[in-house]
Amino acid sequence: MKLIKLMAVTGLMAASLNVLAEGGGDKTFERMLSANDKAMEQYAANQGKPAPVVKNYEYGMKLDVVKVVSVVRPQVDCAVVPTAMTYEDSQGQLNTIKYSVAGECRKRGG
């Protein structure tokens, strides 16, 4: 059982590395954001709410976050990387913002 899990994780990691090698992180993020958009459209429909529109975060923007619904996980990279968050505000509206964060930098080897 442990071997099967290890093989699945290894395959996922290899596929992730191939995606990064083939098109870079921006294409990977755009695919992840697209998948998140579809999931949030379904979530909104289930909640009887309009689907959120993706907006770019700007410094100083006031956010009215009551409940975080979804976060697009940042890429593993030693750089500034894009991410996104969908949240519900105090009016019950769903909002999605794209913003940049420091990527999760992992040392190789050791």
Image (cartoon, rainbow, N blue to C red):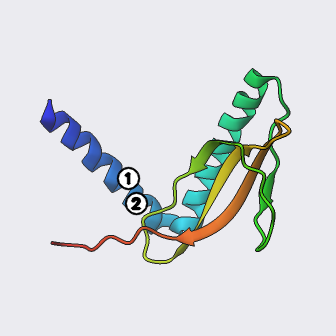
23 or 80, nearer to the observer? 80
Crowd rating for badge 2 (residues with CA inside 10 Å; few <14, some 14–19, many 20+): few
Report helix, strand or loop for mark 2. Answer: helix
The residue that mark 1 highlights is 15
Q: In the rendered view, would you say 102 is above or below 74? A: below
Question: What numbered label is drawn on residue 18?
Answer: 2
Residue at the spot 51% in from the left edge and 60% down from the top edge: 74
Q: Which residue type does callout 1 highlight?
A: Ala
Q: Left or right: where does residue 104 sit relative to residue 30?
A: left
Looking at this view, name the residue that lies furthest to the bottom: 79
Q: Which residue type does callout 2 highlight?
A: Asn
Q: Residue 15: where, in percent of width, then height?
A: 38, 52
Q: Residue 71: where, in percent of width, then height?
A: 59, 49
Q: Left or right: where does residue 33 sit relative to residue 93?
A: left
Q: Left or right: where does residue 59 sit relative to residue 110?
A: right
Q: Left or right: where does residue 17 sit relative to residue 102?
A: left
